[in-house]
Amino acid sequence: MRRAINARVHAVRLVVLAGAVLSMASMAGLGPVSDGWRDEVSRRLAALRPERPAEYLALAEDLVDRASNGGAADVDRAMARTLASIGGAIDVHGMGRSAALFLVENSSNDGERSRMLAVAALLDPASDVRVEAAERTESVLALVRAFSFYRRGDGIRAKEALGRSDAAALLDRHADILKGGSARFRADCDAMRSSGVPAMSDVQVEALHALASGSIAGAPRSWSESLARIGPATLPEVDLDDPRSLFGVDPELSVWDGKAWTPRPAAPAKLTAPAVKPRGR
């Protein structure tokens, strides 16, 4: 009887020990389950094609879900961000918002998170409130872009940017950014060739930062209140017509060859039969 009990205890101990070993192997990213997952990732990466952009984001989400269980978590998360960026760049208006929201959640960089929030706002037509927020954000980003050219001494492009999305009217409502508003801005641009690039004080730059931050956060407020609540952040510059700068990847490099992203395959040339000449009569 005692021998039987000892045998059972020994068997239970072996089962518990085996379970612990398997659990540790799984946590370390080893074992058949992990190998199977890596094989699946490799297969899905090789099958990605730009004609199916949703599959890039689906794989990105799966990588992030599994990343916490593997020893290569940072590598997996970096690949997931790249996949989401490529999917968004391939189809900005179809997948861009989903990709941007994924990057907001998984970015470790405040500037990138702020820029992706702006992208998501501009691409979301879900409600009247969101449309108004997008319009407001677009005006702010046009003004930010105008000042970016302004501070680089590119007066022509600065005036062009100011003329878009009611950016000039927005500047006129915020004298703390530039006294004299849009008229002063245009005059400075015209005088750049002879007088050089105008200097902006720290207070002016902070006002512009805070205006952008307040708009992206979703609620219009004074620049001083925005600065107190959010602080100065990297100014997001968003151009929905430039997917490469929008997501930081080249959408043409969207096919994985096992080591790097390569150009999408060229479409095969269509063969056309030569025209048949009519027989003479």
Image: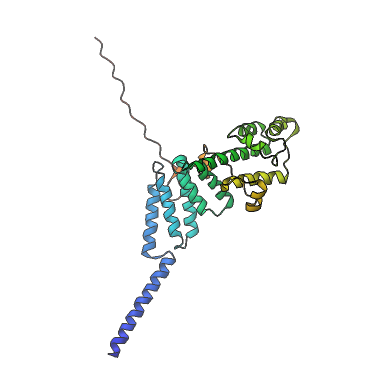
Q: Look at 63% across and 35% down and name the residue there.
A: 169
Q: Nearer the viewer, residue 27 or 258?
A: 27
Give how far across and how far down residue 222 sits, in percent.
65, 46
* The residue positioned farthest toward the bottom in the image shown: 2
Does 237 appear above or below 28?
above
- At x 68%, y 46%, the residue is 206
In this rendered view, identify the residue nearer to me: 10 or 145.
145
Find residue 268 and report its horizontal and vertical position in percent: 36, 34
Q: Is residue 58 visible?
A: yes
Q: Residue furthest right?
A: 195
Q: Nearer the viewer, residue 152 or 204?
A: 204
Q: Residue at x 73, y 30 (%)?
A: 191
On the picture, is 148 further left or further right than 60?
right
Q: Is residue 131 above or below residue 83?
A: above
Q: Position of residue 38 (x, y in %)?
A: 40, 58
Q: Quadrant of the N terminus?
A: bottom left
> Is residue 257 something that shows in the picture?
no
